[in-house]
Image (tube, helix red, strand yellow):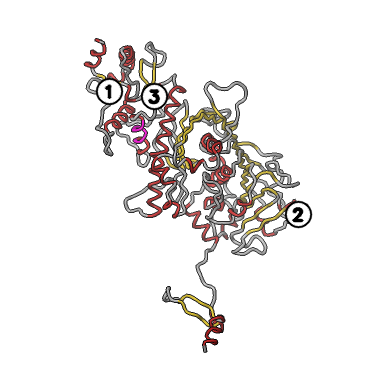
Amino acid sequence: RGSRDRQGQADSAQIQHPLRPGCKRRTPASMEHAIRDFGQKIDLCTRIKDILAAYPDGTSVLKELLQNADDAQATRFRLLLDLREHRTEGLIFEGTAGFQGPAILAYNDAEFTDTDFDSIQRVGGSLKAGSIKTGRFGVGFCAVYHLTDLPSFLSREYAVWLDPHCKHLPSVSAAEPGKIVDFTQVPDAAAAAQLAPFHGVFGCDLSGPFAGTIFRLPLRTRAQARDSRISPRAYAEEGAAQALLADFARGAGQVGLFLTHVRDLEALVWEPGAPEPRSLMRARLYADSVPPPRGPRRLLPRSPLYQAFADAGAGAVDRAQSAAIDVCAGVRVELIHSPEPRGSGAGEGEGGGAAWLVAQRMGGGEARAMSADSQVAAYGMRLVPWAGVAARLGGEPVEGRAFCQLPLPCATGLPVHVNGFFELAPDRRAIWTGSSDLAGAGLIKARWNTALLRDAVAPAYARLLREAEPLLASSDGGYYDIWPQARPGDSLAQPWASVSDALYAALVAGEGGRVVRTGAGPGASGGSVAVAPRDAWYFFPPWTTPALEEDEALLCLLRGALGALERPCARAPPGVVRCLRAAALGEAVGGGAPARDLSRMTPLEARRAARG
């Protein structure tokens, strides 16, 4: 009997009891015909449709392709709206004939790696090869399905088609919904027909492997939209694609400020019957310096902070967890072409351009600690304590935007752009913010963004002000325009108010250096000098009145005279002074030393200074 039991065990399968999860029982092999595979499944079209419902349409689709190019360390990025119709006879895949018409093509000068070919097959599960990449071909890449049902791309010797519907390509399935073709091994006639939309664009001649990558997004037609299980929107009709490209071109003067590698962007359109495409816009990012260099400018090689980490070696990001690093660099954006008229704004207009100062910081405070926290890693989150700010030097003040390497449709109320490796809201239109009922990953995301703003953005902002002061020496207005200011009846919304609060606290503590201007003013007798906020004297009520604050000639005389008596008086707008004083009086918060007001200039103090 024992022998028979052992034989029965050898011939049986062990399965989980369906009603008692901890209990296992054995089923004889003779019953295996009654057992079938069972489990939850994901329909690819439904999954993509759900992603699109939460992912914004519009220029965000094109920006996602730009972000992927930047992650690939490409330096050039081109968008082409190809309105031509290409041949439909002799195709390798006959079902793709309806996708040989108008399309948007995106080119970059980096080749697909083997890891990239694996990553793009994983919906929402990109293989992040680099610790300071925002991700390659994750959920964001699915944004291209806003425009098309059959995206394709060409890189090296391969051409790839992705068919989530599994109806346009032959012999595809839910497990393998696409085709990859080594076009160098395909007869020339077949390759010429199928790959005609790629031939002759961005230097691609199909004679051999292509040194770069071209994505092609055939615009969804009305007929395709009616049958699509992904999106009902047609992009091939009524100028939708033209408007999309024009919107991207209008924002090109600022879109690349925080990118790490892409330094040359262009948008083009190829009209039917035209011998070549027409450029709508070309933007280049140059390294800027004061005074301007002699001879031709050089393209900014890569983000200064990224370069600092590249120079430091592969472990630089991890070493930043023990020491913060910050850099500041001038960037000039030049637009060679633009659809907008001259003078329509900074960085816009034919031949236009704008000078920017960009300060970035890696590491610091709680943000640094969270990036190394094992609990954070347990949630599958890779937090990078990298953030920065960008201020335009000259011209009208900018309406500050939030960036996550690329601009978000989210105004901050600050006079600078703010960038960071933020955790984004589900719709990717704003950064994640917290509430008292959050827990788990949601709480970590909210804490992370708060820490990044306080511990990385604010110190970078302080560094930017210190570097900007001598660059904007000819104008107080231009300099203080890049400061956040408290104006009557106006207040910043959270979380951006925390940037202003942390910035002014750092400045009052002396961490920003000499940023407050004193003296008579630019070009006036008595000169001008910048000092640390606590080394300056300030005019406060009741000695000052609104009339005195508006009498710049009298204030100039007072500051000049008091400066000569070694009482440097701040030359700053009332909104800046109010913020500095609020920070000074708030120093005791958190158990620090008793609050100490800024040095107030009064008639008594003026007489004391005059007596020596």
The kind of secondary structure element at disc 1 is strand
Q: Which mark is residue 185?
A: 2
Q: Is residue 251 left or right of residue 203?
A: left
10 Å crowding of disc 2: few (<14), some (14-19), many (20+): few
Q: Residue at x 30, y 12 (%)?
A: 565
Q: Position of residue 575 (x, y in %)?
A: 32, 28
Q: Is residue 505 magenta?
A: yes
Amino acid residing under circle 2: Gln
Q: Which label's residue is closer to the chain start, 3 or 2?
A: 2
Q: Is residue 47 above or below residue 71?
A: below
Is 539 drawn above or below residue 381 in the view shown?
above
Residue under pointer 3: 514
Q: Give residue 142's position: percent from left, percent from top.
A: 54, 53
Q: Which residues are magenta?
A: 501-506
Q: Magenta: predominant secondary structure element?
A: helix
Q: Secondary structure at mark 3?
A: loop
Q: Where does residue 136 sit, x and y in percent of width and height?
A: 56, 49
Q: Nearer the viewer, residue 322 or 499?
A: 322
Disc on res. 79: none
